[in-house]
Amino acid sequence: MIKVDRRRINKLNLPEISEGAVVYWMSREQRVRDNWGLLHARELAGSTRPLIVVFCLVPSFLGANLRQYDFMLKGLQQVERDLRGLGYDFALLSGQPDQTLPDFVRKVRAGIVVTDFDPLRIKQQWQVNIGQKLNVPLLEVDGHNVVPARFVTDKREYGARTIRPKIQKLLPEFLEEFPELLPASQKGEGFPMVDWDQVRNSLEVDESIGPVDLASGEAAAHAALNEFVEHGLGDYAEKRNDPNAEATSRLSAYYHFGQLAPQRAALTVASRPAGDSVDSYLEELIIRRELSDNFCLHTPNYDSLDSAPEWALKTLAEHSADRRDYIYSYDEFEQARTHSALWNAAQSQMVRSGFMHGYMRMYWAKKILEWSASAEEALRITIALNDRFELDGRDPNGYVGALWSIGGVHDRGWKKRPVFGSIRYMNERGCRRKFDVDAYVRKWG
Ligand code: FO1
């Protein structure tokens, strides 16, 4: 018997459940296994209602390009195959979800709709619009956070130090094994198979940023998790800040597209012998990641400098007229044409592989602050480059990472310096103390 914890579920509109199918509108959690939203939809379907899974493909989502769409579509194709294998219907709708989904729900005479929690503005807006248009309930299920974002706290937290005890207190209740998704009990409507080639051809995205060499899909995500736990985790605490060691998990694209549940990774990592590596990975995976969702959920302008704390805005304003040794344009940054071989190498790593090492992401963004005309401009450039080249762009983690580096979000004040004021400073000398900078430049420069 599937029973999803009610504290993961949030009802977004007023109508009560009526006769008919259950529709699961998949969006952030693009997987079949370990998916609380899909499991709850299955729970509601029980033995009497058909369950239809639908994905709304937006022809151009927040400036995403072929790199991200290619990865996402390959994963979705596997989702369709696996769902059909269990006897479920899968449909792909093209267009804006608030234009297409309500009609679809009416057409299939659904009695209830379930979707994924996502703190991004556009998702929240879609949900409000769709909730208003439906005459059946729209439920949101948090399948991303181990401790549901709406439950852990009802306000924006100051930082890891304030959210950590709240999450830790609830972890024993929420870090539970997932039930298995049972096969369909009711025959569906028999939706035709999606024509994925046609879907690819219908995209209206920038194709100049091409796919990268990372296998997409739920199976690949599980394989990458197991590979990391077997071969990378042991050294994680010691080597995670060394971009040459490749000791990080490289799972972020799988989390971003929902091909891997953070909770699955947490269960797997937590089952290993206790130690610094397990602790520090769980800190990143649970506390830091859930802190990002908390920030975006309670900060509608999460991608603007206005959302930085007051002390940070004050110190940046005091130093806004400081002389900059270098000022680069967006194009110069994009083309890795700065004076710093280390910065250029980090930029090239991201452009070529769709991934920049976590430690370098901090250094890279801090230098954009140092070498831009203003902090606002620096944040704009950082987010634009991140969203264009990273596989996991346009994610709460990315917005919060940029604001941590440039706007002091979730950080505190440090020793004052030109341009930065008391925003934490990083420089190449610090990198040299941590890793072999020349080897990194040789590899990516
Ligand atoms: N979510 C959707 O529901 N439909 C889409 O067409 C879609 C496209 C897309 C492209 C690039 C990308 O990085 C994300 C995309 N997402 C899409 C959203 C994604 O699943 C995430 O939920 C959010 O970006 C972060 O929470």
Image (spheres, grey):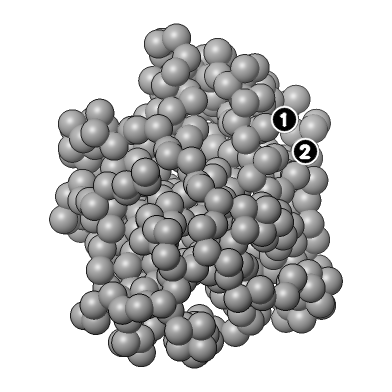
- Nearest to the observer: residue 263 or residue 374: 263
Please indicate, yes or no, whether residue 179 appears anywhere in the rendered image. yes
Q: Is residue 163 left or right of residue 283?
A: left
Q: CA distance from mark 1 to mark 2?
A: 6 Å
Name the spot of residue 389 as percent of width and height, x first: 67, 57
Residue underneath mark 1: 440
Q: Position of residue 352 (x, y in %)?
A: 77, 49
Quarter holding residue 167: top left
Q: Secondary structure at mark 1?
A: helix
User: Are the two marked residues, 1 and 2, in contact with CB atoms closer than 8 angstroms?
Assistant: yes
Mark 2, residue position = 444
In the image, taking residue 55 as reference, residue 6 lies left or right, namely: left
Q: Which residue is depicted at the point 41% across and 10% down?
A: 275
Position of 109 relative to 374 (above/below): below
The answer to whether 370 is drawn above or below residue 199 in the figure is above
Q: Is mark 2 within 8 Å of ligand 1?
A: no
Q: Does 139 sit left or right of 377 as displayed?
A: left
Is residue 322 in sight in this rendering?
Answer: no
- Looking at the image, which is closer to me, 96 or 397? 96
Image location of residue 251, percent across then percent down = 59, 39
Identified at 72% across, 75% down, the residue is: 192
Q: Which residue does the image show at 38% across and 83% down from the upper left?
A: 130
Front-lying residue, 134 or 429: 134
Q: How many marks?
A: 2
User: What kind of residue is marked 1?
Assistant: Tyr
